[in-house]
Image: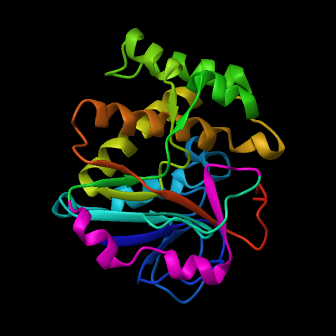
Amino acid sequence: MQAYCVGHRPLLFQPAQDFRWVAPKLLDERQTIVIPDDHFGPTYDGRVLSEYTQLFGLADGLTAADASEDLYLFQYRKFVTLRQGSSRSTNLPFAFSASPSEAARIFPTANDLVPGHGRTLVGPRLSVRSLAQEYARAHIATDFVRLCLALSTVVGFSVERCGAFAACPVFVPSPALGLYQVQTFLRHMQILRDAWAVFHARFYQPRDGYQRRVGGFLLERLHSFLVLEEASRGIIPQLVHGHQIIVGNTLEVVLTI
């Protein structure tokens, strides 16, 4: 199993296992795959796509020989584990808020994850009216509509599949966190990359403030859909929903830009 911390900021806790950084710059002395936010040019700007720019870079670095291995992904203050935290977040009830010391205790070890070979571990599943409605609660609804239009031109996305995406009644927040087989990760990254290329070329409009990361927000929803769709079709044979942990010193999770 390979473990990677994907992110833009230094760790807020000390994980219980070795890992490599995938980051836009060196953040500490650990071994790092450096993928600057402008690595792929303006289309895949990390300021817009958040960690998906670094995830695309990681995908490029994984070889065919790695395809059957397991890959555990986490972020500087966020991870998925089979162990429940002690305190629910007050503003994100699907997640647990943990102090740095508690996070270090419940972070999954290699032994925790080894029994899951062939299994996919992601965060909790949330019941929503639809992904379209869920996106519109916190973001700009027209961007989601434009993503659906972009998907309709991507090979493999029929009108019916686009409709299933928009109407999907389940959402997995931060689906890039968790345990994946490398071959699954590579497959998903290619679909997300293709979808964003079309969206950026035809529909992208720059946003300000928190909405600047529109690409990351949109790809998060599409990534969640891909995981759930493949699980329902048996492509992902063992999908397990764990607990999302967000590291902080208060029960309220502060949103970051």
Please say if 257 is above or below 168: below
* On-image quarter of the N terminus: bottom left
Residue, x 79% and y 68% (percent of image)?
Answer: 250
Percent across and percent down for residue 52 are 52, 51
Please say if 47 is above or below 236: below
Q: Please, which residue is most extreme toward the bottom here?
A: 29
**Residue 207 sits inside the magenta stretch:** no
Of 124 and 42, nearer the camera is 124
Percent across and percent down for residue 8 are 63, 66
| The residue stretch that appears in magenta | 91-117
Residue, x 38% and y 35% (percent of image)?
Answer: 228
Of 233 and 208, nearer the camera is 233
**Residue 101 sits inside the magenta stretch:** yes
* On-image quarter of the C terminus: bottom right
Percent across and percent down for residue 10 are 65, 77
Q: Please, which residue is most extreme toward the front here?
A: 86
Q: Is residue 13 visible?
A: yes
Of 240 and 63, nearer the camera is 240
Q: Please, which residue is most extreme toward the top here?
A: 159
Residue, x 49% and y 86% (percent of image)?
Answer: 30
Q: Is residue 139 visible?
A: no
Please say if 123 is above or below 81: above
Percent across and percent down for residue 150 are 51, 21
